[in-house]
Image (spheres, rainbow, N blue to C red):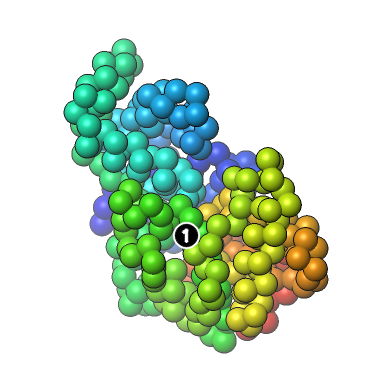
Amino acid sequence: MGKYAFYPGCAAKGASRELYESTIAVSNRLELDMVELPEFSCCGAGVLEEIREVLDIVVNARNLAYAEKAGRDIVTVCSTCLLVLRKAKYLLDNDDDLREEVNEILIEAGLEYRGTVDVKHFHWVLLDEFGEEGLKEKVTKPLSGLKVYPYYGCHTVRPKEIIGYEPSENPQSLEKIIKAVGATPVSGERRLECCGFHAFWPAPKISMELTGLNLKDAKREEADCIVTPCPLCHMNLDANQSRALKEIGENFKIPVLHVPQLEGLALGISEEKLGLKRNIVPFKTLGGAR
């Protein structure tokens, strides 16, 4: 089994605390060798590069260097953190001049980026370590009869040259997780579409329209719930659900779960440890899993 450095990101430590709690609970139940390094800092969420690109890369090279020092691949539960960290790694691994420039800065902190660790999403690790069949064997409370809409969003599949875990046009990792927990995936045409989270402040109407259309697609597929690997998508789909549906003239409720919450339910972990009380659309609205 691999050794992992847990990089929760800011959302999972703040607005999406339930994601942090459920990830820790699932990791412990599956006995993953995963530790959170105290040296990790915010990835900058792509904002720093708007000010100065090299600053953005240095900040994330620092995170990567600390993981290298610990001899652990980074695992994150945030799709934006995933993209930012993997982009920094991609640029550093493919530009010797940039790597030299960044290391000249890192040396002041006694660090050096060498390119020896990978950056993975938590649900990739579940599949890589156990496989779909292996996860099935861990299930104690199969979610039989539950129809789950796998909503990928953007940053766990695109751009493919940076993310590259699976085909960006037709990913299947979430479907595999859903089937492993005993549920049925119901994939719709908008499962790979943007939710508009990063456009919320400059263009809230468009952001909410996109989110609403994604929710409507899940409803059209008769899903009992949505599962997403991204806490930012989760905020739009769950916390902003009423506003998004109002924007497109719809009115219904559909629960939205984080991947470790779905996995944790099948592993028999309590709703309290999975932080389900923090979800805005309550889990009690689900039918088949209860």
Q: Is residue 30 above or below residue 223?
A: above
Name the residue rendered at 61%, 49% in the picture.
197
Q: Is residue 159 visible?
A: yes
Q: Is residue 70 visible?
A: no
Left of 38 or right of it: where is 167?
left
Give the residue type that dot 1 points to. Answer: Val
Q: Which residue is mark 1?
A: 26
Left of 248 or right of it: where is 77?
left
| Label 1: element kind | helix
Residue 35: give x, y in percent of width and height: 39, 43
Instruction: Kindly give the residue lying farthest to the bottom in the view shown.
Output: 145
Q: Is residue 239 above or below residue 182?
A: above
Q: Place residue 135 in its image quadrant.
A: bottom left
Name the residue rendered at 48%, 46% in the picture.
80
Q: Place residue 97 in its image quadrant.
A: top left
Q: Is residue 228 above or below residue 109?
A: below
Q: Residues within 10 Å of mark 1 (few under 14, many from 20)?
A: many
Q: Nearer the viewer, residue 11 or 187?
A: 187
Residue 164: give x, y in percent of width and height: 31, 56
